Amino acid sequence: MQDSYGRTVHYLRVSITDRCNLRCAYCRPAAAIEPANHPWVLSYEELLRLCGLFCSLGFDKFRLTGGEPLVRRDLVPFLSRLRARLPSASLALTTNGVLLARYAEALRLAGLDRVNVSLDSLDPVTFEEITGSKGIEAVLAGIGAALAQGFSALKLNVVVMRGVNHEEIPRFVERFAGSPVYVRFIEFMPFGINGWDRERVYPYASILRDLEARFTLTPRRRDGSGPSRDFDVEGAACRVGIISPLTRSFCEDCNRLRLTSDGKIRSCLFSEEDVDLRVLLRSGAGDEAILSAIGQAVASKPREHRLSADTTTPSHFTRTMRQVGG
Ligand code: SAM
């Protein structure tokens, strides 16, 4: 589908739960948020119907996220059914990796194509400071299991925060130099009250400078849609990418919508307006009405978000990544 600015929107990020088994400081607001009421969370039946409708509109890439998608019961059978419903779509998952070793093989067999794993530190103490968990070994085992299953282009997401983990940037490349992964460094974004402060943003230019001080990088051609600027690393199997929503926005290429776990479409990660599909689904709406609501959400995609590294009122964005679906 084309939006009002001529962008083709064909990628849906589907949050299947807002529950999570980690408590990452940058994702959780200072005042704990309650998970969505269980009855509000879309059932797998509802998700299958919606994904089928999105597919009929030309959406061909679906990413399951959350919260932590692997904490939702019966995810693997759901994925098998989703694969059967969408035989030629790209199906991906974003996970914190804690439970990935347990599920990697079953996910592969169910038809999952791609996995992104979040890992913000290689140091157990810093990992625990950020996530509130001692689970670093489980995450590393999950990454190993995903590689063993042959998931192509495994991506590791590292949120970089000045004074917290920015000094680890080269270490990530060294650690994964022998593996066919993309290590993607992400600028720290403001959401709700998540401890964001512009002083803690470690911008694109600094990440690139730190990488170039240690490695020889060659820019890769952009595929025209992903948010990441990617580079080959001389002598390494891994690649690196930098995602810079604050200092080098990628809105002009944005191709996505987000579906929250309680059934609302967000046309931009930072917009505060939703199109509520749950109400439609549960009031017995026919396919035409739902397709029209999806069209409305695509049409309402803003040209760009209003965020920059100079943002001073981060609490303006009241929903966290965990709620919107990262
Ligand atoms: N639980 C899964 C995970 O950890 O990957 C999926 C959900 S998580 C919200 C999705 C992604 O959003 C993660 O890579 C996480 O690091 C990123 N994220 C969350 N809050 C962020 C923030 N304030 N700035 C940048 N990235 C953030």
Image (spheres, grey):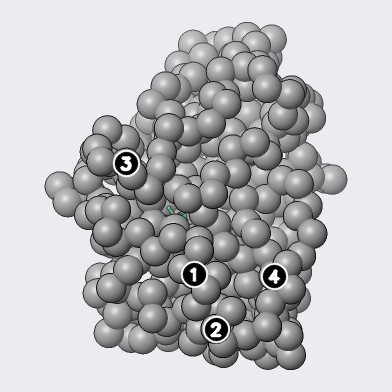
On the picture, is 245 further left or further right than 190? right
Ligand 1 quadrant assignment: bottom left
Q: Could you tell me which secondary element the residue under label 2 belongs to? A: helix
Pointers 2 and 4 in contact (C-beta within 8 Å): no
Of tags 2 and 4, the one toward the viewer is 2
- 317 over 224 or under it: above or below: above
Name the disc covering residue 213, or none: 2
Three-letter amino acid code at the position of disc 1? Ile
Q: Could you tell me which secondary element the residue under label 3 belongs to? A: loop
Q: Could you tell me which secondary element the residue under label 1 belongs to? A: helix
Count neighbours of disc 4 (C-alpha within 10 A) and say few if under 14, some if 14 to 19, many if 20 or more: many
Q: Farthest residue toward the right?
A: 88
> For the residues marked 1 and 2, what is the alpha-carbon distance in whole angstroms?
10 Å
Name the disc covering residue 231, or none: 4
Three-letter amino acid code at the position of disc 4? Phe
Three-letter amino acid code at the position of disc 3? Thr
In the foreground, 264 or 228: 228
> For the residues marked 1 and 3, what is the alpha-carbon distance in whole angstroms?
20 Å
